Amino acid sequence: MLDERLTEQRNPRSERIDLRTAREIVDIINREDRGVAEAVAREGDAVARAVELAAEAFRGGGRLIYVGAGTSGRLGVLDAAEMPPTFGTDPELVQGIIAGGYEALVRAQEGAEDHPADGARAVDEVDVGEKDFVLGIATSGSTPYVHGALERARGRGARTGFLLCTPPSDELRRAHDVVIAPLVGPEVVTGSTRMKAGTATKLVLNSISTGAMILTGKVYGNLMVDLQVTCRKLQDRGERILMETLELDREGARNLLEAAHGQVKTAIVMGRRGVDAREARRLLDEAEGRIGEVETP
């Protein structure tokens, strides 16, 4: 393919996939997918560093901001959108910026990724500053929009990171606080980075955002105790968390959750310490949201 980027190489294991049966095609894709998690695992130290950078941003009043184009941008927006219902965060805390704007979420805006000035402008529009951590996502490593956004973010004092699926240059490593490069290899369909590279991207973003939320007290044990009770499913989950952690029956859990104004974390502290909602929130504020530090006197 005359392209040095790993994401653009031809995969010898799928060169004759056009002559295969449906089941054989599925088997080829599945065999290729098996190596994705291993590629991400090899980048564990870098992913952990990104988790720390995101947590530091949150503790300091900053934000985690993803920037990408195409599939990369959509995955960033998706991960950001899941944070409020899962962890009860302000929608501004984790944000996704995608080349072409929100129209690009549902319809490809391929030319939008070619302009670094547009990436820089998008960073300006969300007022990125020194408290923020901005993670650029470009599986090929070359998307101009992402590079423009990160250059402007660094100029505004933000910490920056880069996620790609091809070997990073020394220059790229020097430019950013962290570089994450899961090398998943050539795609089954040459250049279709929505496949293995997209899967690796989602795994990495899930780890970064979830890890940072855990470090900042959004999880108790392995329970998502900062969820927002905004629908029947989450109401049920909140009640079940209280039933399990406080050994309550369903009615007792429902009444306690109501007294806590739908805040599961507050309800747990109320139950553990025998205090009202206001005192429970005060105790949590003092402990920076970590239930483990306030559940016993």
Image (cartoon, rainbow, N blue to C red):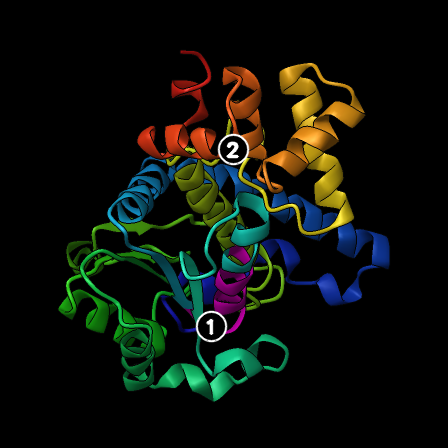
For the stretch drawn in magenta, the main secondary structure is: helix
Rendered-image quadrant of the C terminus: top left
The verdict on residue 69 being magenta is yes
Indicate the position of residue 280 as horizontal and vertical percent values: 46, 29
Q: Is residue 230 left or right of residue 279?
A: right
Estimate the spatial distance between the alpha carbons at disc 2 and disc 1, rounded to whole Å.
Answer: 63 Å
Residue 219 appears anywhere in the view: yes
Question: Residue at 35% of width from left, 41% of height from top?
Answer: 51
The answer to whether residue 9 is above or below residue 173 is below
Mark 2 Cα within 10 Å, few/some/many (few <14, many 20+)? many
Q: Which residue is mark 2?
A: 277
139 or 188: nearer the viewer: 139
The tag on residue 9 is none
Question: Residue at 65% of width from left, 45% of height from top?
Answer: 229
171 or 148: nearer the viewer: 148
The tag on residue 1 is 1
The answer to whether residue 286 is above or below residue 22 is above
The verdict on residue 15 being magenta is no
Please report the bounds of the magenta region as a residue range.
68-79
Type of amino acid under label 1: Met
Indicate the position of residue 96 as horizontal and vertical percent values: 45, 65
What number of labels is visible? 2
